[in-house]
Image (spheres, helix red, strand yellow):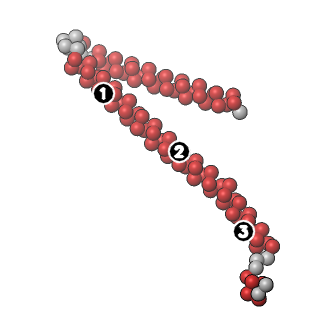
Amino acid sequence: MTLKEIFETKSPFEDLRATLLAYVKQETLGPAKKLGRYLIFGLAGSLLLVLGVILLLLGFLRLLQSQTGSTFTGDLSWIPYLIIAVVGIALTLVSLKAARRKASAKELLK
């Protein structure tokens, strides 16, 4: 061993501190980054899904207004809006029920 190597060696306490610091970073920062990435992609996906459903509902409304001939004209022009509102509320309730069912199933598995 050279004199330079002797002076550059760390004390056991410094080595322990460095090891503990590396371990804490590995066990906290890594999972936190993964959780953040999971949340970002989840939120982006849910926003895109909601946007897609809204566009589909608007397309269905346009279909009802234009392709049904004289069925929904005059005093009945509000019926397509009612149909779309009912379908939108039904989709919302079904998705909330599915989310709750999935959450309760996860709790049962714990």
Q: Residue at x 23, y 19 (%)?
A: 65
**Residue hosting label 2:** 39
**Residue hosting label 1:** 58
- At mark 3, the secondary structure is helix
Quadrant in the picture for residue 7: bottom right
Amino acid at dot 1: Leu
Mark 2 crowd level (few <14, some 14–19, many ≥20, 10 Å Cα): few
- Could you say which is closer to the camera, residue 82 or residue 96? 96
Quadrant in the picture for residue 81: top left
- At mark 2, the secondary structure is helix
Q: Residue 97 vs residue 82: left or right?
A: right
Give the mark, 2 or 3, whose residue is nearer the N terminus.
3
Q: Residue 79 vs residue 73: left or right?
A: right
Q: Furthest residue to the bottom? A: 3
Residue 42 locus on image (x, y percent)? 50, 41
Q: Residue at x 49, y 44 (%)?
A: 41
Amino acid at dot 3: Ala
Amino acid at dot 2: Leu
Give the mark, 2 or 1, whose residue is nearer the N terminus.
2
**Residue 93 to residue 4: above or below:** above
Residue 50 locus on image (x, y percent)? 41, 33
**Residue hosting label 3:** 18
Label 2 to label 3: alpha-carbon separation = 31 Å
